[in-house]
Amino acid sequence: MKRASDNSSERPQKKHNHRPIHITVGAVTPPASQLNNEKRKFGTSSYGNYPSYYTTRHTQGDATIDYRIDLLDASMFNGKSVLDLGCNSGNITIALAQKYKPSFIKGVDIDENLIRKANTNLRVAYSLRDPNTKEPKHIDLALQSHYFPKCLSNLYGLLPMAVPPTFEHTEFPWTVEFETVDWTEYPYNPNEQQYDTILALSLTKWIQLHGGDKGIKSFFKKVHDSLSRGGSFVVEPQELKYTGAKKLNLDVDNFKFLPEQYNDFLMNKLGFKKCLDLGAPKGTFYLFLHI
Ligand SMILES: C[S@@+](CC[C@H](N)C(=O)[O-])C[C@H]1O[C@@H](n2cnc3c(N)ncnc32)[C@H](O)[C@@H]1O
């Protein structure tokens, strides 16, 4: 697979402007009306914004692992710039950052409470690492302590992550950034930012439920345009079932563009060059290569 730097003459690449991650303390509270709207919008988890996703998703098996991570090839991440769309509380983003060492990985989610949690989780993951090897002994999705006694963070708190603005962000956890954003609305400028790898795990249903057939097609187009040449798109198409659809006036039966047609659209309409089925145990887990 070609590295992004191979084609710098063909497409302008922005140097990532990595910002230090910080936890905002005492943030300005938005007005009550805005808070009520937010509550209505997100309260029902109608965007798949489940607050305890990584503890409930894995009730069938071991909560500390995610079978999807092991299906992904290190070459898609190591030294690459990565965008994790709909990252929820960031557990997968953080695990990928630790396991595969991307040069930069950004997790975005529409729900600001989840992004707040993701930033805390990042600090937890940093604080739990063995300071001698800096290599995590286990990539533990549940962010359990495997080196320090469990009581230490209760007694002494988490490690601070603040660094001077001149600090070169080349190592975990400073390679990770989270942002609250509705990515379908996010202004896109190909001259500003392109990624080597984009992930859309358990996200397509939520994009289509709210944006319809047109919305999911524009979403795929935006992903395609946001990838650098040779980049990879990892997508986990979901069935369009949602028990809360009626309550939200969403007519799931009216969708004409179905998950089994995504593949054809991505390859024949958008021009992805190669598609691999990574074959997840549950459902299908595609990898599209954009060459
Ligand atoms: C079911 S979770 C999947 C989490 C994670 N990607 C995984 O598979 O482990 C879907 C996430 O997508 C987020 N989401 C839904 N629509 C979004 C949008 N338009 N922009 C950004 N995030 C979105 C939700 O808030 C939720 O956290």
Image: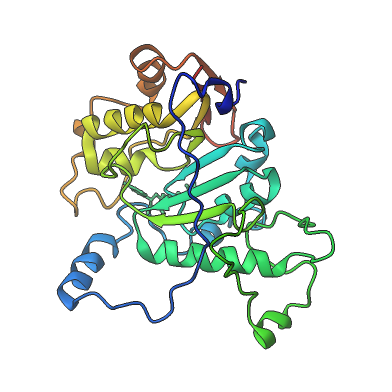
Above or below, 102 relative to 109: above
Q: Is there any visible trace of residue 159 in the rendered image?
A: yes
- Give residue 168's quadrant in the image: bottom right
Residue 125 to residue 242: above or below: below
Pick out the residue farthest to the front: 166
- Percent position (x, y) of residue 155? 68, 88
Which residue is pictured at 33% across the width and 31% down the height? 222
Q: Which residue is drawn at 39% across and 66% down?
A: 113
How many labels, in total? Answer: 0
Q: Is residue 287 visible to us here?
A: no
Q: Residue 84 appears at what percent x and percent y?
A: 48, 44
Left or right of 183, for residue 171: right
As displayed, is residue 228 above or below residue 67?
above
Q: Where is residue 122 in the image (x, y as percent from the top left)?
A: 58, 63
Q: Is residue 255 left or right of residue 202?
A: left
103 or 238: which is nearer to us?
103
Residue found at x 57% / y 50%: 92
| Residue reaching furthest to the right | 132
Considering the image in quadrants, where does the N terminus appear?
top right
| Quadrant in the picture for residue 247 | bottom left
**Image coords of residue 212 (percent x, y):** 22, 35
Task: Between residue 85 and residue 22, name the one nearer to us.
Answer: 22
Q: Is 156 rendered above or below residue 215?
A: below
Q: Residue at x 43, y 79 (%)?
A: 25
Render colour scheme: rainbow
